């Protein structure tokens, strides 16, 4: 698979006027925290007219479902993802994963309202999950997501630390996973760090510049998020298994 497949798919998304936000690995690429992504992950509006445009897009991509559940709004509204593989020559082999409900995040219209619009190297304008929303979406049980969160916040910090806004400082204090960054921002903005310690208690250690304690507190925080994510997906996985058994029984009787 070549990297050109994703830009081609994104171009078609814009051409078809599909309201979808890029998330996952490709969003990390566009935010400068990753070098390459093989798949395209999208947050999709379930408005009826948008679903019609998205189905037209799937047809143009030659995309077919590759996993349960089937692509139906009721499954996406419940928090499931839909998974597709493209077969059209210009995007052959590209996998597209689609969700509409993301754990810990508001509905699509709110996400769309605070999205980030980026002009990619190809000159194409791409709509992404905002960086704070992407970081929250990455707080999963998967090992690979936590180093990416750290890189996303670090990249944003080193790009903007010269003259940061209060919103940027809040973002670093609430989401950074780098002890040195937390200590530095807390040192420069102690009042803000102290007020945010009510939301993120480990900022107390950052204010005390306790480099020996912060790593263990960050790990504790990570483990708690992983646990919450596992609990969130348990009923959804049970539903997938129920659909799988139902499909198997149907095939046996056909």
Image (tube, grey):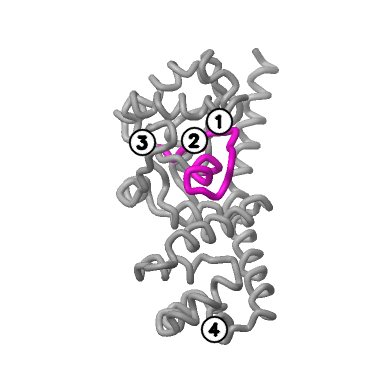
Q: Of circles 1 and 3, which is in front?
A: 3
Q: Is residue 41 magenta?
A: yes
Disc 1 and disc 4: Cα gap in Å? 42 Å
Cβ atoms at labels 4 and 2 below 8 Å apart: no
Check disc 1 and report its element: helix, strand or loop: strand
Q: Which residues are magenta?
A: 24-44
Disc 2 and disc 3: Cα gap in Å? 20 Å
Q: Of circles 1 and 4, which is in front?
A: 4
Pick whichever of labels 1 and 4 is earlier in the sequence.
1
Q: Which residue is mark 2?
A: 98
Disc 1 and disc 3: Cα gap in Å? 24 Å
Which disc, if any, is residue 204? 4
Pick whichever of labels 2 and 3 is earlier in the sequence.
2
Q: Residue at x 37, y 68 (%)?
A: 163
Residue 84, quarter of picture? top right
Which disc, if any, is residue 125? 3
Q: Quadrant of the C terminus?
A: top right
Pick whichever of labels 4 and 3 is earlier in the sequence.
3
Disc 1 and disc 2: Cα gap in Å? 6 Å
Q: Quadrant of the N terminus?
A: top right
Q: Residue at x 38, y 19 (%)?
A: 56
Q: Is residue 99 magenta?
A: no
Label tally: 4
Disc 4 and disc 2: Cα gap in Å? 39 Å
Q: Residue at x 51, y 75 (%)?
A: 200
């Amino acid at each position: 698979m070549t990297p050109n497949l994703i830009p081609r798919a994104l171009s078609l998304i814009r051409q078809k006027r599909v309201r979808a936000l890029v998330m996952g690995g490709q969003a990390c690429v566009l935010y400068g925290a990753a070098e390459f992504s093989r798949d395209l992950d999208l947050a999709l509006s379930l408005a009826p007219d948008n679903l019609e445009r998205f189905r037209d897009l799937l047809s143009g991509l030659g995309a077919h479902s590759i996993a349960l559940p089937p692509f139906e709004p009721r499954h996406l509204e419940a928090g499931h993802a839909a998974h597709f593989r493209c077969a059209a020559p210009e995007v052959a082999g590209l996998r597209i994963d689609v969700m509409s409900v993301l754990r810990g995040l508001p509905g699509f219209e709110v996400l769309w309202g605070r999205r980030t619009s980026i002009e990619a190297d190809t000159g194409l304008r791409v709509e992404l999950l905002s960086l704070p929303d992407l970081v929250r979406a990455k707080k999963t049980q998967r090992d690979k997501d936590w180093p990416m969160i750290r890189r996303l916040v670090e990249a944003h910090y080193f790009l903007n630390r010269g003259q940061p806004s209060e919103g940027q400082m809040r973002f670093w204090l609430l989401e950074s996973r780098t002890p040195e960054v937390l200590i530095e921002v807390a040192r420069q903005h102690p009042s803000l760090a102290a007020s945010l310690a009510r939301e993120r208690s480990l900022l107390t250690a950052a204010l005390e510049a306790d480099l020996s304690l912060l790593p263990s507190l960050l790990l504790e925080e990570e483990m708690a998020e992983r646990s919450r994510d596992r609990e969130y997906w348990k009923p959804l996985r049970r539903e997938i298994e129920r659909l799988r058994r139902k499909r198997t029984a149907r095939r046996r009787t056909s």
